[in-house]
Amino acid sequence: MNLDKQHLAGIDNQEIEVPMESIFTMPERVVQFGTGALLRGLPDDYIHQANQKGIFNGRIVVVKSTRTGNTTAFDNQNGLYTLITRGMEKGKIKELKCINASISRVLSVHDSWEEILTTATSPLISILISNTTEAGLLELGGAIDDSPPVSFTAKVTAYLYHRFSYFNGDNSKGLVIIPTELVSDNAKVLKRNIVWMAEQQKLSKDFIDWIDKANYFCNSLVDRIVPGKVSEEDLSYTDQLAIMAEPYKLWAIESDNQDVKSILSFAWVDSTVKIVPSIAQYSELKLRLLNAPHILCCGIALLSNTEFVKDFFNNEILDRYIQYLLFKEISPIVEQSGISHELIQPFGEAVIDRFKNPFLLHKWQSIAFQYTTKLNMRVCPLIEQWYSKQSEPPIGIAIGLAAYILVICNQDTTEPSFQDDASLIILRHQEYSDFTTRILSDPKIWDKPLHNYPGLTSIVHTIVTHIERQGILATINYFL
């Protein structure tokens, strides 16, 4: 049996949550640029759950921009897809299955551009969501009169200009625009690019003013691992669009405007949608409490031959290390920055659950991609903050740095196991007996060389030597 609207009655609703019939008559209120798993596993999940509870009462018309694949699966399944939630939540396995009916239709820009523009004339459309690539958000090519326009910015500009023209510049017909790309100030970037595009295309000043005054551009942060397809054995029917997601989810949307909050009424369905005046603290939590431990544990995992993230906790010593790192070093540093303990503690506990997820096969080797860059972005600011209050080096972070040095230095130069743009510089230092000091003090490697922090170079050197002689597990056991 194939998943579609006609076969819903034949699906066991004790095992899988089935959408209410009334959802299929709800109007389109959202235009979404992107068909990817993240959008279907996060924003579309919230919208579907809100529709199920009679809160939002609106569906999504999805714009497919890429040439790869087609819309056939969406067409055949009436936009339906199964979302399987699997993972750890508060230390226990959680598994849910839900058929999502948030998508009314999917239109390809290459086959249906005029039809896409026609949706811009609907007074009920009030929200625009996007998830192109980070590079795609910054791309500025093409003209809005092309069919379709080449770049993402040109497509959105064309869509908004069509709406502006149809409604004669009515300020009440602006949209709430929420990019979800992993770019800092993503909405500000998109708005700036749209204004630039409008100026380059010599569109009217009235349109540029309408962009500024009638539309709400909201920076946002999305956080949920949605690894993609699921096994056919997981379902009693055929679903070409089924995806899996972890239980953890967060969508932080930046706005203090009451009209925005009213339009985004789907946020009422779940406290993990945060409409807040600033998303900075959520970005900081993710960067420091999730991303920083990821990269600091990476070298340790590789040195201990631990292949997957979930397996890190199978070893008592490695488990103890990450608990110490997260709650004894990084959490206090983040709290110094002004984020409350009430936010930090549950976020940190959720990180442990996420790392332990037995259904995710996330390889440490893939995390090591651009290892040095990630340390610069995620960890070095933590070290600087640590030393603003402490005089002794952070031992957990130091162990992570020592593991990093050994992993980089032990890579095969002809067949490296992962890409790191700084690896050739680092390997040149390996020829010297004081290679640890040379690596930590090289301004070509670090945004802020690490040898200036009291005791840090010395302890990292000591740990490197200990790992070389005793191994990573014995070293962690000795120092912690």
Image (cartoon, rainbow, N blue to C red):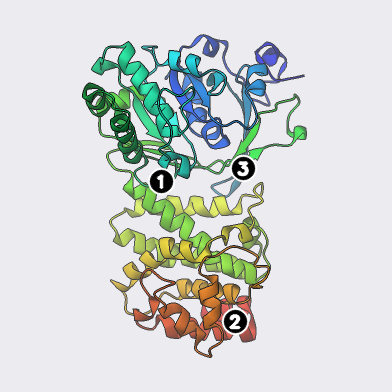
**Label 3, label 1: how many angstroms apart (C-alpha)?**
20 Å
Say what secondary structure mark 2 lies in.
helix
* Mark closer to the chain start, 1 or 2: 1
Q: Which mark identifies residue 183?
A: 1
Badge 3: residue crowd in 10 Å (few <14, some 14–19, many ≥20): some
Identify the residue under disc 3: 227
The amino acid pointed to by label 1 is Val
Say what secondary structure mark 1 lies in.
loop
What residue is rendered at 44% in x and 50% in y? 346
**Label 3, label 2: how many angstroms apart (C-alpha)?**
34 Å
Residue 34 in percent (x, y) is at 52, 31
Looking at the image, is 314 positioned above or below residue 41? below
Which is closer to the viewer, label 1 or label 2? 1
**Label 1, label 2: how many angstroms apart (C-alpha)?**
37 Å
Q: Are marks 3 and 2 in contact (CB under 8 Å)?
A: no
Can residue 270 be spotted in the picture? Answer: no
Identify the residue under disc 2: 467
Say what secondary structure mark 3 lies in.
loop
Residue 94 in percent (x, y) is at 61, 40
Quadrant housing the N terminus? top right
* Mark closer to the chain start, 3 or 1: 1
The amino acid pointed to by label 2 is Ile
The amino acid pointed to by label 3 is Pro
Badge 2: residue crowd in 10 Å (few <14, some 14–19, many ≥20): many
What residue is rendered at 43% in x and 61% in y? 378
